[in-house]
Amino acid sequence: MSRIVPFPMRSTWFCIVLVLSGVCSTVCAFAADRPNVLLLCVDDLRPELNCFGKDYIHSPNIDQLAASGRPFHRHYVQAPTCGASRFTLLTGTYGPGDNGALFKRAAQMAKTPDMVPPSMPKWFRNHGYTTVSVGKVSHHPGGRGGPDWDDDQQPEMPGAWDRHLLPAGPWQHPRGAMHGLANGEIRGNASKMDLFQSVAGDDSIYPDGLIVDEALNQLDDLGTKAKTDPAGNPFFLAVGIIRPHLPFGSPKKYMQHYVDASLPEIPHPSKPSGKTTWHGSGEFMKYNRWSRNPNDDAEFATEVRKHYAACVSYADASVGRVLSRLDSLGLRDDTIVVLWGDHGWHLGEHAVWGKHTLFEESLRSPLVIRVPGMQQAGMKTDSIVETLDVFPTLCELTRLPIPEFVDGVSLVPILNSPDAAGHDAVSYNAHRTLRTDSHRLVLHRSGEAELYDHTVDPGETKNIASSEPDLVKELSGRLTKRLAGR
């Protein structure tokens, strides 16, 4: 069996011994003392990528990353909202289900710092890494609070980053960049801001262009230091790309991929009956929609989906720029790359346009991990994994101790073999859900349950909880055990 081994402790040409079908072979690769980490976070990115089976999507850069790494096709987030999901990524622990999760943690740190375990970037910083964040990595781009999200006295993650950056440019401040449209347009009254647009220009006419420019500056600096001083600190660089978050604005060149594209029909587009976590798509509906509703206007629904796709292609190009610079600096063989989507997003399934449900569409997002020298690169895995698993995985790959406080498990066995077993995934908002290999259970605070059999109903359209009480009881026990004391 092919194996990924953690990076060696000394810089050298080394040999990884592989055992494959009983035959030993040797693959040589160059590794630094400790590998760098490049974490790419993409907002509101469902698995709407060519490499995840959406062949009408133009995503060549992420496709190439997936072809050289391990794409996790059944990765689930802990919460279907930005702040709470990023909390679990950055702390490796369960947390609150709302967007203020990291600020609540910061407030707790101010009162009882010894009671709050270090975050993932802080853990790496404590172990000699230079940690840098650019863009939307925590919930607020730039990682600060205040009216415009730029108050240095209100850090979202105190002590985590050596540098936490957000170049706002014509959008004036991080709050403006978060929902910015072309050429410095800032959201005031959402009803006055268009739901989508496609404007001619280069990547810098939208905020992500400036975010990537700064990420390249940081990568140049970190990479130069890594190459000129082999005994220096490795880096942990996190880059947060905002699109395809609402509003769906992207340079026109990315929309050109979809002008004449034929999109598949929306699966299970009807509003579900009974008790579910369905909602009225409030975040989406508050924008200027020109008095149109995609739930009863098929042409408009297609326009929305194409503009979302254009934003995905814009995000893909942003990822490509960073990966290209990594290669040009000669750092590919010294750097672990993780691409992570913070949650899924409904595009009309269950008559929802947005996130925030506990349906599959809100909770499943892309995850790709690339380790230099890995074998069986490009082979996808269908093993179920969670966002919580990223922290311990990166620790094992970099030979850092895995802290006892993390709630996830290392994914190195699946990086070694895509057929290795995964594990149940737990998610939550106001309610809780457990995703197993074959079923999804949703438990409501009021006591009602939803149960879906994915072997016959992957769209989660038929609640069979009333006819399967024993299974509901069994899965409820597993869910309760996972969240015990949390």
Image (tube, helix red, strand yellow):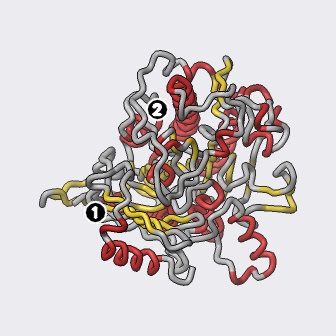
Q: Is residue 302 visible?
A: yes
- Report how far apart the C-alphas of labels 2 and 1 lie in the structure: 27 Å
Q: Residues within 10 Å of mark 1 (few under 14, many from 20)?
A: some
- Identified by mark 1, the residue type is Ala
What residue is pinned by disc 1?
420
Q: What quarter of the picture does the N terminus occupy?
A: bottom left
Q: Residues within 10 Å of mark 2 (few under 14, many from 20)?
A: many
Q: Along the horizontal axis of the image, is 43 left or right of 5?
A: right
Q: Give coordinates of residue 282: x percent, y percent.
A: 66, 45
Instruction: Please tell me whether residue 339 is drawn above or below residue 307 in the rendered image.
Output: below
Q: Residue at x 56, y 25 (%)?
A: 300
Image check: 82 left or right of 332?
right
Q: Quadrant of residue 74?
A: bottom left
The residue carrying mark 2 is 59
Marks counted in the figure total: 2
Residue 192: x percent and y percent? Answer: 79, 31
